[in-house]
Image: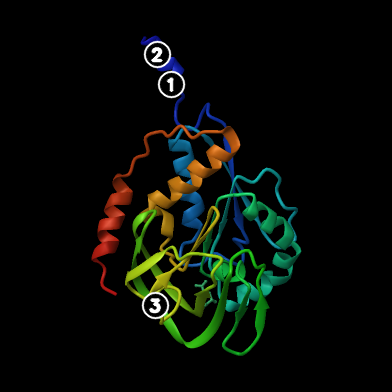
Amino acid sequence: MNPEANSVPAAGQGKGTLRVVQLYPRDMNIYGDWGNALVLQRRISWHGYTPELLEYNVGDPFPDDVDIIVGGGGQDSGQLVIQEDLQDRAAALRDLAEDGTPMLLICGLYQLFGRFFKTRTGAVIPGIGVLDVETHGTDERLIGNVKVATPEFGEVLGYENHSGQTSLGSGVRPLGTTAKGTGNNSSDGHEGARYRNIVASYLHGSLLPKNPAIADFLIRTAAERKFGSFQPGQPDDRYAELAREHAARRPR
Ligand code: GLN
């Protein structure tokens, strides 16, 4: 037996544990957003770390030692259900964000990590102000496949379905510029937001299976924060590439 083979940790072993927390999956998890957490779980393992996937729902004790936070989309009604609990967690989530915790926030939670979401009926759901963005509900629903040109992650592909339109303040930068689809709003051509180690986006699909560069950014950042460096493994990207090819061919 090759003695060196023993020194190479098998997938999922040896490099330490990374804890992923999915926020509010009971109320905020539509269009397959849970797939983002599953991709992180699988790729953490492919990179040779041990994934730990936890759910946080309204009323739960908030987990300690969080390495990556993932939040999904939800109907306006789901946002109303979680809003009070989210405010109770606002200070802790803000501290994690400012401290550089990598986070992926999709659609409904993207909106609520901003300053506020004013719904079509005029109700204001306060956000937690981690992101310098605000969202206004409109009568227009933005639906369809989206391609985004991003400086950090290349071409990002996904699917949008929202009536809230988000505008960015000077404290965040856009994730990218839409090449197909609408993104944040129907006026400025931007999609998503970037702030510290947060990636926020309107894109479902789910996002990470088709955009492994974003998954690896979250994992690399988490590993560097926790262990001082990231030692990548060898992920199997065949299915991600097939999914990207397929998604890129879809009409709007
Ligand atoms: N309810 C919000 C909107 O329509 C968020 C929708 C979503 O998360 N897909 O703007």
The residue that disc 2 covers is: 4
Give the amino acid at mark 1. Val
Labels 2 and 1 touching (C-beta < 8 A)? yes
Closer to the chain start, of discs 2 and 3, is 2
Label placed on residue 143:
3
Q: Label 2 sits on what residue type?
A: Glu
Q: Along the horizontal axis of the image, is 184 left or right of 155?
A: right
Judged left or right of residue 152, residue 196 is right
- Amino acid found under the numbered disc labelled 3: Ile
Which residue bears the numbered disc 1? 8
Return the x and y of residue 36 as percentages of the image width and height. Answer: 48, 54
Q: Looking at the image, is 142 positioned above or below residue 234? A: below
Residue at the image point whose x is 26% and y is 68% from the top: 250
What residue is at 73 percent from the left and 66 percent from the top?
Answer: 85
- Give the secondary structure at mark 3: strand
| Picture coordinates of residue 92, whole percent (x, y) | 72, 56
The quadrant where residue 26 appears: bottom right
